[in-house]
Amino acid sequence: MTAVSKADDRQQSGPSGGPLSIWTVPSPERLLWHDLGAVAVVFNARSGDTHVVDALAHEALSLLVESPRTASALTTALAELLEAPEVEVAPKVEAIVAEFDRLGLIFPLVTIH
Amino acid sequence: MGRDVRDITRLPEHFRALRREGLRFRVGPFVAHVRTPFSRLRHDFLETYEGFPLASEAEATTFHLQVRATSPLRRWVRPKLMADAGFAHTPFVPLPGDLGMLAMEMGLNWLVATSSDRFLMFHAGLVERDGKAILMPGASGIGKSTLTAGLSLSGWRFFTDEFGLLDPDTLAFHPHPRPISLKNESIPVLAERVMPERLSRPLHETPKGTIRYLKPPRDALERMAETAPASLILYPNYNPNAKSQVIELPKHEAFAMVRGAAVNCDRLGETAFRTLAALTDRCRSFRLIYRSLDQAIRMVSDLMEHAP
Amino acid sequence: MREGARLLLTVLKNPARQAGLSADAWSQVLYLARACGLLGRVAADAERYGLLDSLAAGVRDQLIGARRVAEMSRTRLLWEMDRVRRATLGSDIKIVLLKGAAYVAAGLPCAAGRVSSDIDVMVGRDSLQWLEATLMAAGWQQVKSSNYDQQYYRDWMHELPPLRHPERNAVIDIHHTILPPTSRYKPDPAKLLANARMIDERFAVFSDTDLLLHSAAHLFADGELRGGLRDLVDQRDLIAEFGRDAAFWQRLKARAEELGLTRPLAYSLSYAHDLLAAPVPAEVLTDARRALPWPPLRWVMDWCVRAALIPPHLFDRAAGAAVAGELLYIRSHWLRMPPLMLARHLGVKVWRRTLGSRP
C-alpha cells in the first residue's frame, strides 16, 4: 500500500511527461474507492495496487476523471476550489501529478513539444 | 487402516500407516496427507495429532507432505531430516533428527500459506465465543499464540494461532485448529493451566529456542467445520512494564493494519480490497496492551460488548 | 505411464471428464497440476465447462484459489505492458511480446488460467541498448549483480540480464532472438521480427506459425523439459486455434524449414498429438516425423520426454524421473553451449556453491 500525499520535496517526471502534458485517468471505472474518514483508499484494478489518498489528491484525481487537463489547468481548478492562490497550490499539484504518474494512476494523453 | 477408527490414534496401525501409505486427516477446510519414516517423529505426531478426524475416501487431498532424510545415509547416521512437499522452490531447511515435529509443522504451515487463496488469509490468532469471531493479528513473539491459547482454555473456542481464513463471500472465518506452538517464556505460563498430557515433549535448540506444542482442545476439533462471522479485531501487545490499556484504532489505521496482516492480499487483488473494506466497516479494531495473561483475558471479555 | 499423469492428461484433453473424477483421482490431479504449473489452467477449464459448482468443496476451494492467482498474473502482465508503454512513450520502438504476454495480448485460448512470473519481450539487436537504458532510466534495475553473470548473459544468452522494477517486483526479460546464440538451432531473428503482427502502436506478437515454432523451440531445443507440460499445452492450444485454417499447415512447414526448426516442430506436433490429442492432420504428422532423429536416439528422447514432462507424485517417486531430469539438463546445456564453455559454466556454478555465495 502506498501513500499519495502532498509530498512537496518529491519531484520526478518520466520521459515525455513534461509540464505541457495533458493527463488523463485511463479506465476510471476500474478505480475502487473506500472512504476511511481522514483519508480514502483507492484500489487500481488495472495494477492490483492499493493507494492511500488524502483529500487534496482525491480531489485532484476526481478532476482528472472529470476531464483530462494539464498540470497548470489542474492547479487553476484546485486553487479555485480551495480559494487559495495558485502559486501556493502549484508545487503541491506538481508533486501529486508526478506521484500519480509514477503509480500509473494517470497517463499523458498528448504531449505538446 | 481400521474400519472403525475415525480419528488419529496412537494405535500401531496408524504408526505403521505413517511410514507406508501415510495418514490423511482433516484440518478445517483442508485434507493433509503426511508420511515419514522416522519413528521418533511418528510417535510425536500421533501424540500431538491424536483426535484429529481422518479424511474419508470421498474427500480429496489438499496437500501432501513427507518428512524425509536429507540423504539415504542421514536416515541412520546422525539423522538430518527435512520437509518435502514435492515442489521446487520450497523454503524448507534440514533439521536435526530430533526436530521432526518442527519440520512437519513448518512444512504444513507453508502448504497452508500457499494453498489458501480461496480465502483471505491473515497471519493471526483467532477464537470464537457466542458465535462471534475475534481476529488477533500480530507478528510472532508478541503474545499472539499465548493469548490465543489462554482464551481457548477460558471459554472461547479455538480456531487457529497462525492462519485466520476469511471467506470473502460470507465474511465468516473458517477454523484451522492445529497444535499451538508455544515458545520459550510462554511455555510455563500455559503449562500451569493444562494437564501435562496436553503438551508435547519440549523440542530444544530449535531456531526459535525451545518449543512445545499444545494440543487443540477437544471441542475445537469436533467443531472444526463450524464457521463464525468476523466481529472484532484486536492487536495484542504483551508488555509487563507498560500501563495496561485498550486503544481503539481510527478507521484508516485499522484498514492499514489489517491489510498488513492479510498475507495473500496481493494475490487476491480486487477480492481482497472489497473484503478488507467490508471487514473494517463491520468490525471495530483495538490495540490491547496488557501485563499478564489473566488481565488480557478479562480485557477481551469486556471488549466482547463491542462485537456486533 | 503412471496413473496420476494419465489422469491429468485426460482432464487436459477433455475438461468435461473433470465431472467424473473420484476424490482420489482429484488428489493426484491437484498435486500434479500444481507441480506442472497447470492448476490455473485446470481451474479455467472447470469454469469454462460450468463444472465449478458441481465439484466437492475441497476441490472447488483449490480451483477458486488457483483461478484468482491466474487472474492476478494476467493483471500483472497487462500492467507491466502499460508501464513499458509509459516508459517508452514518444519513441517509435516496436516491442514484440513473447510467451504468456503474447498469449494474453493476442487473446489466445492458451492464456486462460496461465500464470507467468516474468514478462518476456523481444526487440531488434539495434534497439537492445536503447530499451535497456530507457527502462533503467524509468526505475528498472539489474537483477544479476555479479560481473560473471552479466558477462555470461551478454556473451552466451539470447536475452539481456533480467531487469526488475523494485516497487512492483516485476521482472522483464529482453530478448534479441529466441534461442541462445550457441544453440545448434539458429532461427534468424530478423525474419521473426519481420512477420510479427502489431497489436497496438507499441506492441506486436509473432505470426501464427512463429508463435508455435517459438514455443516448440523453447521446450524442445532450449528448455530443460522439466515441468514442460505447460508449454506443450500452449502448443496444443495454438495448433487447435490456428489449424482450423487449412492453409496454416503448409505455411507452418515452409516456415519451419526457413527458420531451421523442423526438428523441434516435429517433437511438438508429435507429443502434442500423442499426449494431448492436438488436432494435427495425419499427413502433416507423418511428414513432420521425418525430421525426428533415428533410433536409438529417438527412443532415448522419447523416454526422457515422457518421464520429464510430468513429474512423479511425491508419494510415488522412483529414481527414473530424477535421472531423466538430469539427463535433460545436461542435454539442454550441451545443445546450448560449446563443450569447453559448458565445463566452465558448470564449474563456476559448483565453485560458487562451495563458497556459499548466492546461486
Image (cartoon, coloured by chain):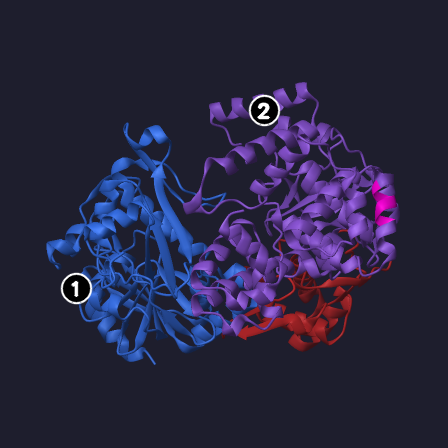
Q: Position of residue B11 (x, y in %)?
A: 19, 53
Q: Which is more toward the observer, C317 or B296? A: C317
Please indicate whether residue C206 sits to the left or right of residue C136 in the image: right
Is A44 situated above or below C266?
Answer: below
- Which circle marks residue C212 in the picture? none
Q: Secondary structure at mark 2?
A: helix
Q: Position of residue C90 (x, y in %)?
A: 83, 53
Q: Amino acid at mark 2?
A: Leu
Closer to viewer: mark 2 or mark 1: 2
Which residue is label 1 attached to?
B294
Count of residue discs: 2
Q: Is residue C254 magenta?
A: yes
Is B24 situated above or below C54?
Answer: above
Chain bearing tag 2 is C
Which residue is label 2 attached to?
C346
Residue C290 in view: yes
**Gap between marks 2 and 1, in whole Å?**
60 Å
Please indicate whether residue C288 sits to the left or right of residue C225 in the image: right
Please indicate whether residue C335 sits to the left or right of residue C63 in the image: right
Q: Which is more toward the observer, C106 or B134? A: C106
Q: Which is more toward the observer, B66 or B153? A: B66
Say which colour chain C has.
purple
Please provide the residue range marked out in magenta: C251-256
Residue C95 in view: no
Say which colour chain A has.
red
Please indicate whether residue B70 sits to the left or right of residue A47 in the image: left
Q: Position of residue C163 (x, y in %)?
A: 66, 42
